[in-house]
Amino acid sequence: MVDVDVHHKLHHNRRHFKDSLLLSHPQVPVQPGVVWSTDASKFVPTHFNPKQTVGPRNIPDTITADSSPEEYLSLLWDDSLWNLLVEETNRQAEYVKASKPNNYFAKTFVPVTIEEMKAFFGCRVAMELLLHKDRYEQYWRSKSSWLTVTPGFPKVFTRDRFLAIWSFLHCVDENGNDLDKSDKIYKTRPVLQKVLQNFYHYYVPQCELSLDEGMIPTKNKLGFKQYIKDKPIKWGIKTFILCESSSGYIVNAEVYTGKVDDDPSYIRNLGVTGSLVVRLCKPFEGQYHCVFTDRFYTSVTLAEYLLDNHATVMVGTALTNRKLFPASLVKKKMDRGTSEMLFNGKVATVVWCDKKPIYFVATKYVSDDLQSVLRYNPQEHKRVPVPCPSVVKAYNEFMGGTDKNDQLTKLHRCRRHYKWPRRLVVKFFVWSLYNAYVLQNHYHPHRQPGKRDVTFHAFVSDVCHALVGAFRRAQEPMSRQSSQIDEARLVNAGSVPQHLPERPANATTNNRCVVCSQKYNQARRTSAGAKNSDWPKRTKTVYWCKSCQVFLCIGTGTDNCFEAYHTKVQFWR
């Protein structure tokens, strides 16, 4: 048995907790005893009323139909972002150099310029969207198959320079005093805020918007990493994206970082997901935009709240166990193509049977007129029209905007050495690329009669080439240190006595001659298809140069490696 005093105490504490929530968070007024009716006249339709003309806005006069893809990108990823990345990347390199003087990349790091940072992003995005390999080093591997070798990347960066910039890439000063480190993505927050601000500033979306989540693949040790078993990408960082349904243009987005205590935007009766929808739609309140959602977000309470408080309408599939959903509409069995509707004056709930009953909550696209969708009929062995309500037709047409964007901007599954802040910065850059691609379509249509379509892949390729531009790595000698070594090892009249052969006391027969070894390595690079017996022999010797302390074999004529090493710069020839 449960102790009565303990039971009352628990009940009192639970009630006190509920009262504290009521005081700390705004509530949605819930109408007790909502009456659902089949009378369609009780449903009041709403109309889209944009404050501005739909499409691009605030576009400079310099942007025309003849503008390059890079110019469209410069609207959304502007000079302030390039300056921020350059400044903070150089600052981070200085911090690392001061704290770790022997760091491989930091001790020889040269400050990055804006031109070099643009070239870096051009190569980095090309690796992600145009040509993917498992490891960065493979882009510089000259020994790989002639079919898979990539000679372009080594012309722009050395391998170590590229990895150094990638290692130090930052957009915040982590030692600064003004950082809010309670924000779990504070390391990338400035970039996210700036690109979302630009997305909103330069574009007015159409009426229909779609809201869904996307996954950025990663397996880092991360507190807000998500696992979603039904997604193609099961492990990663979850993002909530609000897009224009027709084009996939991102109008707002949010990175999921877990539960936030004392969140001022939390609305108690809507819960976490409902509050999320309200936050993402807030910039468009008062215009009767229509938000399409799946059953993870949809509820009657949310639909009423958006309509009453933000003048935003909603269409979405629904779960029947959500609050206020009419139990009388729940069906166990229906014939395919049949449907029923109930209304409460503001919200319509719909059930339509495809293979099984599917439920909708809507404050728009509600009418008695039936549409049709094509479904496969196994008896007739073809797709046949199936009657459906207009809300089903609208949902099928407009829900896919976010999926379209997520499919085209997806990042490859992560390499093991990814760091999640850099992962997010690359994702934000790809979002900017896609939105710039949509902007270009309004000035230069991607589909024109008699011409090949301009695909997003082609757009990205043009941007990457433009970002790299004329930037090329400095033409340096094979090794800066080797020139100093050459001066010490090459024989001249004053240094002949210094280079004398000697048999060290601890010499063994396992020491290979450096000249013979270099000849062998050069032969393997230039004639990979030759037999091993055709390559020069790697001779073993017990003698070395007393001054240079490298093992060399002593012979006659062209076989005298001791003489070749001390008289030729390229002693292997």
Image (cartoon, grey):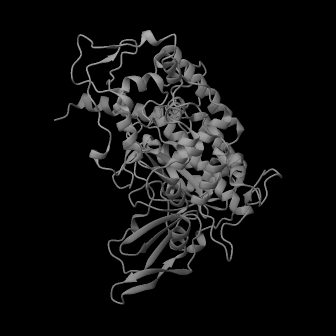
The answer to whether residue 279 is seen in the rendering is: no
- Is 5 placed above or below 153 here? above
Counting from the top left corner in percent of width and height, residue 222 is at 40, 34
Which of 322/316 is in front? Answer: 316
Q: Give the total of numbered labels.
A: 0
Toward the right, the furthest residue is 61
Instruction: Please state if 77 lies on the left or on the right of 373 as rendered.
Output: right
Could you tell me which quadrant the N terminus lies in?
A: top left
Which of 145/361 is in front? Answer: 145
Toward the bottom, the furthest residue is 380
Counting from the top left corner in percent of width and height, residue 193 is at 62, 38
Q: Place residue 82 in its image quadrant.
A: top right
- Is 570 placed above or below 198 here? above
Which of 69/521 is in front? Answer: 521
Instruction: Please state if 479 lies on the left or on the right of 440 as rendered.
Output: left
Which of 192/140 is in front? Answer: 140
Counting from the top left corner in percent of width and height, residue 563 is at 41, 23
Toward the left, the furthest residue is 1
Could you tell me which quadrant the C terminus lies in?
A: top left
Instruction: Please state if 508 lies on the left or on the right of 228 as rendered.
Output: left
The answer to whether residue 336 is seen in the rendering is: yes
Counting from the top left corner in percent of width and height, residue 468 is at 63, 44
Which residue is drawn at the image coordinates 41% and 31% (left, top)?
A: 16
